[in-house]
Image: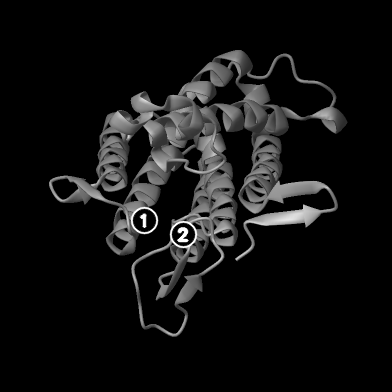
Amino acid sequence: MIPFLHLGPLTIPTFGLMVATGLLVSAYVLQADFDRRRDGFSRHGYLKESKEPSHHDEGFLIIGIAGISGLVGARLYHVLETPREFFADPWPLLLSRFGFAWFGGFLGGFVALIFLAKYYGVPALEFMDLCSPAAAVGYAIGRIGCLLSGDGDYGVPTKLPWGMSFPNGVVPTAERVHPTPIYEFLIWMLIAVILWQMGRKALDGEVLGKVFCAYLILTGAARFLIEFIRINPKSFFGMSNAQTASLISILAGLVLFWRTRGDFRA
C-alpha cells in the first residue's frame, strides 16, 4: 500500500488526499442534484438568494461546511470510543491523521446540514434527500483512502483469491485479509446510484424524506453486514460500536419513513 506520497520535500497522506477527492466529487454530485431540483425550489419559494444560473455554487459551499463538520465529528467519535485512552493523553489522539468513525462523521455532517437547510430556506427533509446521494459518493471514495493507507480498516484473514495483505500499511499485516474498503466502495457507489434514481422520481412529487430514509436504511444495513468481517472489537451484545450505530441508523430510517409516509411534496 502507499500511506504517503512523497513529492520532493512534500509528504501527502493518501488517506487525506482521497478524503479531499471524495469531498470534491460529492460537491459536483450535490450541485447536479441542486440544479435538477432548482425549478421545483423556485416554485416553492426556496433559494430566494440564488445567483445567476451560471454562478450557482450551493453544492460546493454545503459540502465544504458539512465535510469539515463531518471530519470533526468522525474524529471525536473515534477517540471517544476508547475514553480511558483519550483522557489519559488526549492531544496525540485528537491530532492524529488516522482514525475516523463513520457514524461520528454522519452526526457531525447531519448537524451542519440542519443549519444549512434553514439558511437556504429548504425544508429539512427535502434538504436531506438532496444531500444523500452526494454523501454516499463521498464516503465511497474516502474508503479508497483507507485502502491506500492500510490504516487497519481491512477485514479478517481470508483465502479468497482477492484477499490482500498490507505489509507497508499504517497498521501493517502480512496475512491476506478481506479488502473491506473495496467492498464498501462498491456497495456505497451502488447505494448512491439507487438514491440518485429515487431522487429523480421524487421530482414528480413523491414522499418527502424518502431518499434520506433509504440512505439511513441502506448504508446502515451495509455497514452492519461489513462489520462481520472487520477486525473491530466487540462491545454491545457481541456487536461492534459500528454495528450498534448501524442498527440505530436503520431504526431511525424506518421510523422516519413511517412518520412521513403521507407527507408529499406538492
Residue 179 appears left or right of 203: left
Question: x%, y% of residue 4?
Answer: 67, 55
Q: Is residue 15 visible?
A: yes
Residue found at x 68% / y 39%: 27
Amino acid of disc 1: Ala
How much space separates mark 2 and mark 1, taking CA atoms?
A: 8 Å
Residue 158 appears left or right of 235: right
Q: Secondary structure at mark 2?
A: helix
Question: x%, y% of residue 90?
Answer: 43, 26
Residue found at x 47% / y 41%: 100
Amino acid of disc 2: Glu
Q: Are marks 2 and 1 in contact (CB under 8 Å)?
A: yes
- In the depicted view, which residue is nearer to us: 77 or 6? 6
Residue 229 appears left or right of 194: left
- In the depicted view, which residue is nearer to us: 263 or 132? 132
Which residue ends up furthest to the left in the rendered image? 237
Question: x%, y% of residue 176?
Answer: 42, 76
What residue sits right under mark 2 in the picture? Answer: 184
Which quarter of the picture shows residue 156? bottom left
Q: Where the N terminus falls, by quadrant?
A: bottom right
What residue sits right under mark 1 in the picture? Answer: 222
Q: Is residue 261 visible?
A: no
Residue found at x 31% / y 64%: 229
Residue found at x 37% / y 29%: 86
- In the depicted view, which residue is nearer to us: 240 or 194? 240
- In the depicted view, which residue is nearer to us: 145 or 264? 145
- Number of residues whose C-alpha sits closer than 10 Å to that of mark 2, classed few (under 14), some (14–19) or many (20 or more): many
Q: How many marks?
A: 2
